[in-house]
Amino acid sequence: MPWRSMTEQDLEAAKILADKIHVNFPEDMDVFVERLRLYPQGCLVLAEEGRLVGYALTHPWRFGEPPPLNSRLGAIPRNATTYYLHDVALLPETRGRGHAARGVERLVDKARSEGFGNLSLVAVNRSQAFWERMGFRAVSHAGLETKLASYGVDAVLMVQDLGRTGD
Ligand SMILES: CC(C)(COP(=O)(O)OP(=O)(O)OC[C@H]1O[C@@H](n2cnc3c(N)ncnc32)[C@H](O)[C@@H]1OP(=O)(O)O)[C@@H](O)C(=O)NCCC(=O)NCCS
């Protein structure tokens, strides 16, 4: 069951998945539409027998400045300093089979091959341990609490540094 690129035809099903999975953090269809338009190569879906069971929304961004939930990006910054994982989400019955790990590995490979120095994300829904398993670590810095406000009380900024030749 491979991950594949998201298309416009997947948007409606992806939004339905998101509403089921992120009950407490709903995001408008506009958010999905804009991410796919701005950075289609960072939008993936996982399908099982023709039915969408997972998705990932990712894009280059500025490290330490996670976009508020349910907000549009406007544009992908030219001076991006992180490869940002906005969301990786699977239906409950599809979890625990390594699919998420394979999707994340694909995204890490992509970020590395495009020359990013790190990937980052905001862990929610008690997913911190999953991200640690994937090689991320929690970070904190002054003022971050305000930027994470829309993500709920257990939100944690996490980073995976990518060793680059010459670093
Ligand atoms: C987080 C999520 C994507 C993980 O999906 P999954 O299918 O369970 O993950 P995988 O099966 O690929 O697990 C990969 C590894 O992480 C571990 N893992 C997964 N979830 C974990 C958790 N909550 N705590 C600890 N370890 C976890 C697995 O045991 C596995 O370890 P292993 O390689 O030693 O066997 C899934 O739980 C999900 O969709 N959650 C809801 C959406 C969400 O909160 N996404 C994160 C937003 S930041």
Image (tube, helix red, strand yellow):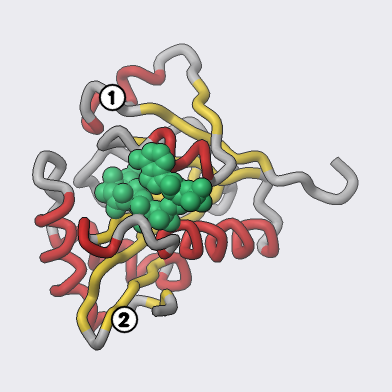
Picture quadrant where residue 59 is located: bottom left
Q: Is residue 20 left or right of residue 80?
A: left
- Residue that mark 1 sits on: 154
Name the residue rendered at 45%, 65% in the picture.
42
Quadrant housing the C terminus: top right
Picture quadrant where residue 6 is located: bottom left
Determine whether the beta carbon of the residue marked 2 sits less than 8 angstroms from the nearest atom of ligand 1.
Answer: no
Determine whether the beta carbon of the residue marked 1 sits less than 8 angstroms from the nearest atom of ligand 1.
Answer: no
Name the residue rendered at 17%, 57% in the picture.
18
Instruction: Between residue 127 and residue 117, name the one nearer to us.
Output: 127
Task: Tell me, for residue 1, which label it has, or none.
Answer: none
Name the residue rendered at 35%, 56% in the picture.
96
Compare marks 2 and 1 and give the one earlier in the sequence: 2
Q: Is residue 8 left or right of residue 46?
A: left
- Residue that mark 2 sits on: 7
- The amino acid at mark 1 is Asp
Residue 160 % position (x, y): 60, 40
Element marked by disc 1: loop
Question: Crowding near pointer 1: few (<14 within 10 Å), some, many (20+)?
Answer: some
Q: How many marks?
A: 2
